[in-house]
Image (cartoon, rainbow, N blue to C red):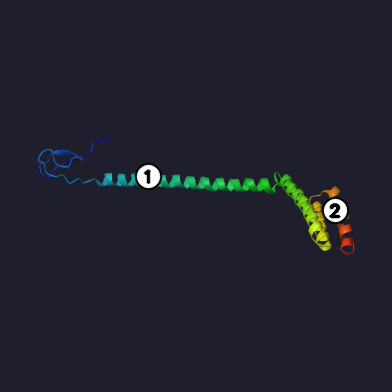
Amino acid sequence: MSVEYEICPSCGQSNWTTDVACSGCGQPLQHQVSPLLQSRAKAKKRKAQAARHLEKAKYQLTGYLSAFVVAVVSSIWIFGGHASGPILQKAYDETAVDFAQRYEIAKRNGSAIDAYVAAQLAVAGYLQAKDEKNYRKWKQIERAEAIRAGMSPD
């Protein structure tokens, strides 16, 4: 470690670079930093700035990579079949039941055509859900509603 000092231009006394006035004659010191120390200070400052920028870039990259990984894993999970099969099947089943409930409402409160259309939707819902037993049942209900509405059953 080097000791930094400077010589007073008035009396020639050696003074620490931290001194404000000469310890020999009391003259104010005008600190002049050597060009080597200036370049070292600038290099140190640039290095610190580069380190901060690098650290910021690491955090940004980590954030982007995390978001990308979450998006890819979610896509694979949802569209790759792990979650889509049970989730979609449950949605199809619930939709078919909902269409059947709508049929009951249409039959009680609507016209024969309303009931026929609602029965068609229930048939389509059970077909989408791949529920063959309920599909056959609702196909028969659809035929009966078609006749009741004055339409051809097939």
Amino acid marked by disc 2: Trp
Amino acid marked by disc 1: Ala
Residue sitting farthest toward the top: 1
Give percent across and percent down for residue 50.
Answer: 40, 47
**Is 70 on the left or on the right of 23, as rendered?**
right
Q: Residue at 28% across / 46% down in the picture?
A: 38
Q: Is residue 48 visible?
A: yes
**Is 101 on the left or on the right of 50, as rendered?**
right
Nearest the eye: 122 or 68: 122
User: What residue does disc 2 label?
Assistant: 138
Work out how far the residue at label 1 is from the one at label 2, CA to CA, in angstroms. Answer: 75 Å
In the picture, which quadrant includes the N terminus? top left
Q: Which is more N-terminal, label 2 or label 1?
A: 1
Q: Nearer the viewer, mark 1 or mark 2?
A: 2
Give the SS element for disc 2: helix
User: What residue does disc 1 label?
Assistant: 48
Badge 1: residue crowd in 10 Å (few <14, some 14–19, many ≥20): few
| Whether label 1 touches label 2, CB < 8 Å | no
Give percent across and percent down for residue 43.
Answer: 34, 46
Give the SS element for disc 1: helix
Nearest the eye: 33 or 58: 58
Q: Can residue 154 be seen in this view?
A: no
Nearest the eye: 135 or 116: 116
Nearest the eye: 86 or 33: 86
